[in-house]
């Protein structure tokens, strides 16, 4: 799982670059033809990782219920993110992945609620969720690469 950790950490560094190089206004802008913005994608990536790995393992997440309701699947930006929210997202970028690696190494993931997502991927374990997660993150990074052209 250390390779999955390394891949995810590298992707999180790319995401951090968006947070550092785009203004609050740019992070919040939903370009015409898109349903979301740069900051929504980053928040969504963090929330989905936590739901996939922790919630479906029956464990508490490191993100608040408020953050989950704002960035989970099926949501879209209803209001602009504040600088405070962006700071929290930036903080969570790495700590969530680091804690997941520690928890995996400590074998805390004992059970998992298997599910099949809308793309047909069946995820049967926390290890499978970690592997699927970097596919999910890459998909959203691709969306962000498109959005950035219009902000």
Image: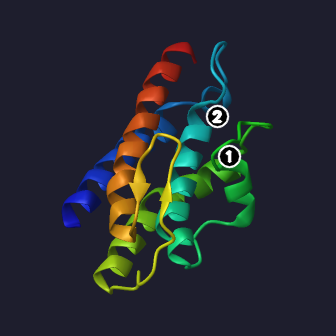
Q: Helix, strand, or loop for circle 1?
A: helix
Query: In this image, 69 relative to 63: left or right?
Result: right
Q: Residue furthest right?
A: 79
Query: In this image, 28 relative to 138: left or right?
Result: right
- Given residues 82 and 52, the one toward you in this image is 52
Which residue is the site of mark 1? 83
Is mark 2 in CB contact (under 8 Å) with mark 1? Answer: yes
Which residue is the site of mark 2? 24
Instruction: Judge whether residue 36 can be spotted in this image.
Output: yes
Query: In this image, 49 relative to 82: left or right?
Result: left
Mark 1, other Cα within 10 Å: few <14 / some 14–19 / many ≥20: few
- Given residues 12 and 50, the one toward you in this image is 50
Query: In this image, 134 relative to 81: left or right?
Result: left
- At 71% from the left edge and 36% from the top edge, which residue is drawn? 76
Q: Quadrant of residue 80?
A: top right
Q: Quadrant of the N terminus?
A: bottom left
Residue 37 in the image: state x and y as whole percent: 62, 30
Residue 132 in the image: state x and y as whole percent: 37, 52
Q: Quadrant of residue 47?
A: bottom right
- Tell me which numbered mark, 2 or 1, is placed earlier along the sequence: 2
């Amino acid at each position: 799982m250390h390779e999955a950790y390394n891949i995810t950490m590298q992707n999180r560094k790319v995401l951090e670059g968006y947070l550092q190089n785009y203004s609050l206004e740019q992070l919040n802008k939903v370009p015409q033809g898109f349903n979301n913005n740069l900051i929504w994608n980053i928040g969504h990536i963090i929330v989905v990782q936590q739901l996939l790995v922790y919630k479906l393992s029956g464990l508490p997440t490191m993100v608040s219920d408020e953050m989950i309701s704002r960035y989970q699947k099926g949501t879209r930006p209803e209001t602009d993110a504040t600088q405070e929210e962006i700071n929290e997202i930036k903080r969570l970028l790495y700590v969530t992945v680091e804690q997941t690696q520690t928890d995996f190494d400590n074998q805390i993931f004992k059970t998992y609620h298997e599910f099949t997502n809308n793309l047909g991927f069946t995820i049967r374990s926390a290890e499978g969720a970690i592997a699927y997660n970097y596919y999910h993150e890459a998909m959203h990074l691709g969306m962000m690469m498109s959005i950035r052209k219009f902000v």
